[in-house]
Amino acid sequence: MKRTLPWMMALGGLVALTAVASRSSTGSNPLVRYSLAAAARYTVCGHVEERLPAGSYLYLRVRDAAGGHHWVATLRSSAVGTPEVSVRVLARAESFTSAKLGRSFAPLLFGAVSEPSSCRPESSL
């Protein structure tokens, strides 16, 4: 239970963010705008090589076991600080520009980040 609590809190925060955003313009919330269907969601596991805070979000560059790199955006308040992470991908933008960071990511994954103990990759990119 102790290990799943941060993941559950992160997922709860993302679900709440999605619910609030769905009441407003879907174009203004990237999690809603680029949301994946439940059946298309997947998990990425790996080592965090870079962390970029941007307001209430945190961008992570994660290297997976195959050596691939993935940029992930998550809520800063719910992100775990461990070097190894599991990311439940809820949305994917083929190209995304962060106004706060002044840079673009291609692609950018949006998801709930948890400790690697919950890492169960369902598919690879």
Image (cartoon, rainbow, N blue to C red):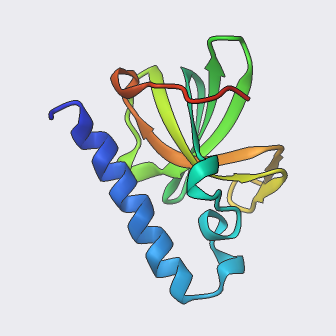
Using residue 120 as the reference point, say whether residue 92 is left or right of it: right
Q: Furthest residue to the front? A: 39
- Residue 28 is situated, as x and y percent measured from the top left of the image, at 67, 78
Q: Quadrant of residue 114?
A: top left
Pick the quarter of the image with the C terminus: top right
The x and y percentages for residue 33 are: 69, 69
- Quadrant housing the N terminus: top left
For image coordinates 54% across by 48% down, the residue present is 111
Q: Which residue is at 66% across, 65% downward?
A: 30
Circle count? 0
Q: Going by the image, does 33 lie left or right of 55? A: right
Question: What residue is rendered at 45% in x and 50% in y?
Answer: 76
The image quadrant of residue 2 is top left
Taking the image as shown, residue 29 lies to the left or right of residue 6, namely: right
Furthest residue to the top? Answer: 66
Q: Is residue 121 above or below residue 66?
A: below
Say left or right for 66 vs 44.
right
Q: What residue do we see at 53% from left, 54% from top?
A: 57
Residue nearer the viewer, 120 or 66: 120
Residue extending farthest to the bottom is 24
Return the residue nearer the eye: 88 or 74: 88
Residues 40 and 78: in front is 40
User: With respect to residue 11, does 49 lie above or below?
Assistant: above
Residue lying farthest to the left in this orientation: 1
The percent position of residue 92, horizontal first and vertical second, equals: 71, 51
